[in-house]
Every structure is written in C-alpha cells, then in structure tokens.
Image (cartoon, grey):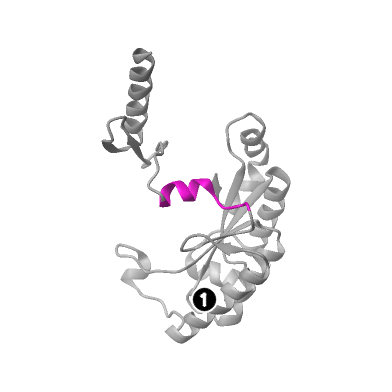
Amino acid sequence: MRRSPLNVTRAAQKLAAFRVTGAGVNRLSLGVQSFDDGALTALGRIHSAEQSRRAVTAARELFERFNIDLMHGLPGQDQQQALDDVSEAINQGADHISWYQLTIEPNTAFYSSPPTLPVEDTLATIQTEGEALLHTAGFHQYEVSAWARPGQASRHNMNYWTFGDYIGIGAGAHGKITEPNGTIDAHPAQSSTQRLHGLYCRADTAH
C-alpha cells in the first residue's frame, strides 16, 4: 500500500486494520521524495520533512516492512543534499528504498516552466555515490529504481516487471488478466474485476 506522509499519522488505526484483518497488506510505501523542506517546496509537495519522519516512525510501528520513495536530481538540489536523503532513508531503517531521478514529463507544470536542474556531471556523481551508499548498507538493486535488503524485494514490483497479472481497483486503475487460452486482456478497473469474476465462474463450472 502506498500513502502520502500526510495520511499516515492521521489514519494510523485504519492502516493497522489492513495488516491485522488478513487483507494481505504487509508493506507500507511512503511517498517521502526528500527529507529536505526546500526540495519538497520546489516539487510542490504539501508535506514537510518532519511530517515524513513522523510517518516513517508510524510505518515502522504499524507494518513489518516499509518502503521509502525518494527522488533525486531535484530543482536546486546539490550532490550532498541528494546523498543526505539516501543516508537518512537508510538510517530510518527502511528495508526497501525506491530511488529515482526526476524526469520532466509533457503536460506537467515543470514541462511548461522548466526548473533549473543539476547538470549531467552532478547527476552522474549522485547516481554513482548513492548506489555506493546503498550497497554498503546491504541493499541490492533488483530493478531500475528499486533497492532492497536481502529477502525484501517487492513481489508487487516483480509481478509488473515479469508481465504478471493484476487487478485494478479504484478510480483510474488498470488491470491485466491472462485467460486460460493465453489471451491477454488489459482493462480499466471495473471491467478488469468483472473479467476476473467471469474467469472464476468458468473455472467453477468446469469442475
């Protein structure tokens, strides 16, 4: 489950219910992005670094494992600030860290009004030294932006990367289901769930 740092402490009791009711949620992913208030402001985030730290503390108490999402190559960010974010995520006890470079996408505010980003040489140094920090702390990289301690790789992530099936639930969600004959159906959330129901019904009828 992924949550904004703002929502974690406010909804601690509800989040705990996902873990203890057999709902299958065993990891909380926090969209921290940075532990630097200046970087968060530049990104337009509405949470603060201190709120992120409180959310991490709550996640550590609520779930047996948690992920911290971090971005680097941020507007106005220097090499040390980027590496400080990685070090803090490690020191906070995360067993999984998603660490990726900011990219400017079309139809976004940054695309319309590009910010000043670190130069390529700085970005390369951040990547190299950040990877060294993670390796030294016992993390291994198992996909482009995902780093995990031994045995803590996300099955959810691996399912996507290996083109596995998944159900989309919620507004704007998307699902992918492989039928018994190998046909792949990719649908928005509602039809994805309906298709899965149909597959189960056919399977029950066949027995």
Residue drawn at point x = 42 percent, y = 37 percent: 170
> Seen in the image, is 105 located left or right of residue 55?
left
Is residue 83 shown above or below 152? below
Residue 187 in the image: x percent, y percent?
30, 38
* Closer-to-camera residue (153/88): 153
Residue 167, by quadrant, is top left
Residue 49, by quadrant, is bottom right
Q: Which residues are magenta?
A: 151-161
Residue drawn at point x = 36 percent, y = 18 percent: 201
> Seen in the image, is 150 located left or right of residue 112?
right
In the rendered view of the protein, which quadrant contains the N terminus? top right
Residue 139 in the image: x percent, y percent?
62, 63
Residue drawn at point x = 58 percent, y = 74 percent: 130
Which amino acid, mark 1? Gln
On whether residue 43 falls in the magenta region, the answer is no
* Closer-to-camera residue (50/206): 206
Residue 42 in the image: x percent, y percent?
49, 71
Q: Magenta residues: mostly which secondary structure? A: helix
On whether residue 152 falls in the magenta region, the answer is yes
Residue 109 in the image: x percent, y percent?
36, 66
Is residue 7 shown above or below 52? above
Residue under circle 1?
Answer: 127
* Closer-to-camera residue (90/42): 90
* Closer-to-camera residue (97/113): 97
* Total marks placed: 1
> Seen in the image, is 207 located left or right of residue 123?
left
In the rendered view of the protein, which quadrant contains the C terminus? top left
Is residue 46 shown above or below 11? below
Element on which disc 1 rests = helix
> Seen in the image, is 13 located left or right of residue 167?
right
Crowd around label 1: few <14 · some 14–19 · many ≥20 (10 Å):
some
